[in-house]
Image (cartoon, rainbow, N blue to C red):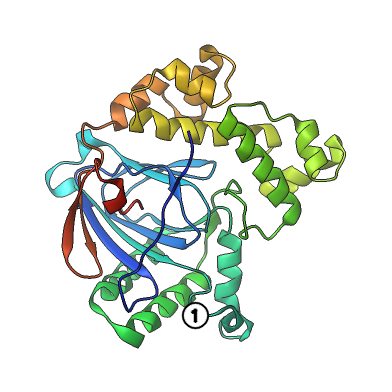
Amino acid sequence: MKFHFEKILPRPGESFAVEYGISPVLNCLYHLHPECELTCIESGFGCRVIGDSIEPFAAGDLVLIGGMTPHHYLSNPADSTGPEWSRIRVVKFHPEFCGAKLFELPEFAPVGAMLAESRGGGLHFPGNVAEEMVWEMKQLLQQKGVDRVATLWRILGKLARSPRRRLSPGGVPGTAMPDERLERVLRLVHRRIERGEPVPLSEAAAAACLTPPAFSRYFRQTTRKRFVDCVIDLRLSRTAAELVRTGRPILEIALDAGFGNLSNFNRQFRKRLGMTPRTWRERFRIADPGLLTCQKSTGFRQKSARDPGGHSLY
């Protein structure tokens, strides 16, 4: 399964996009974009896939997703009715929307460091930070002009001073990865996974210009994961999205992702996600995955799964 590339189009006269979504179910395409994305869940719960990180989310979940990181949010439709509908606030902005030289100023250096830390993955912030950010993000929908830009910088400044946890090293490299060696390795991994091909450690080591033992040590020190575990998690993140977006047979999805057989896929999926692929599909799949009401800066619109071009993908 290929990533869906989303083109972010801010409204005329604006330099970044602000969205507020209300839906009985969150079930977006597995997608990426060059812009950073700040996502806050006001209500609802389910599972989010960010790079090779697959974790549950609930109200108060606040994540800064780095540019070119594939991501996917899923909520449980059985538990998302009435007042428990999913409510999500999203801000999408290019890291240099005010110019790259801004980060050379000492006052903006912490924000630049945080955005660099998010590249190729995501940063998760604790609940008390999310509570404070919700009010600030609400203001963005009402503000215009310089007030709107000032509020975004205030949000980023507060986040830069807040505790956070890195989610994933598994983004799609482009201009986003600060480590060129890791960039080459992850580019190889994503290309092989997209083709459903194996990713030998020896080839990854060669891409990093290291011996296999040295590469194993380097990769674990850099990502806090074994290379083989990172590859498996990236394969699983793709299959998790594919299971709920399509009706393709599970065996076909597993083989396309590079799993050699169904039993190995089922074992790895259950070990990582706590349920079988079939249960995952039944829990998160919905009849109309595109049904979503979204307020984008001003006004509302109804989006349809039959009109991908009209989607805000989150």
Report helix, strand or loop for mark 1. Answer: loop
Query: Which residue bears the numbered disc 1?
Result: 98
Q: Residue at x 46, y 75 (%)?
A: 158
Residue visible at 43% across and 60% down?
37
Number of on-image labels: 1
Q: Is residue 233 visible?
A: no
Please state the horizontal and vertical placement of residue 165, each as a whole percent of the image: 54, 56
At 26% from the left and 70% from the top, the residue drawn is: 138
Left or right of 144 on screen, residue 251 = right
The front one of 219 and 192 is: 192
| Residue 58 visible in image | yes
> Which residue type does callout 1 highlight?
Cys
Q: Position of residue 121 (x, y in %)?
A: 55, 52
Rendering coords of residue 286 (x, y %)? 24, 32
Of 20 and 256, the residue lying toward us: 256
- 69 sits left or right of 188 in the view: left
Q: Is residue 234 above or below residue 83?
A: above
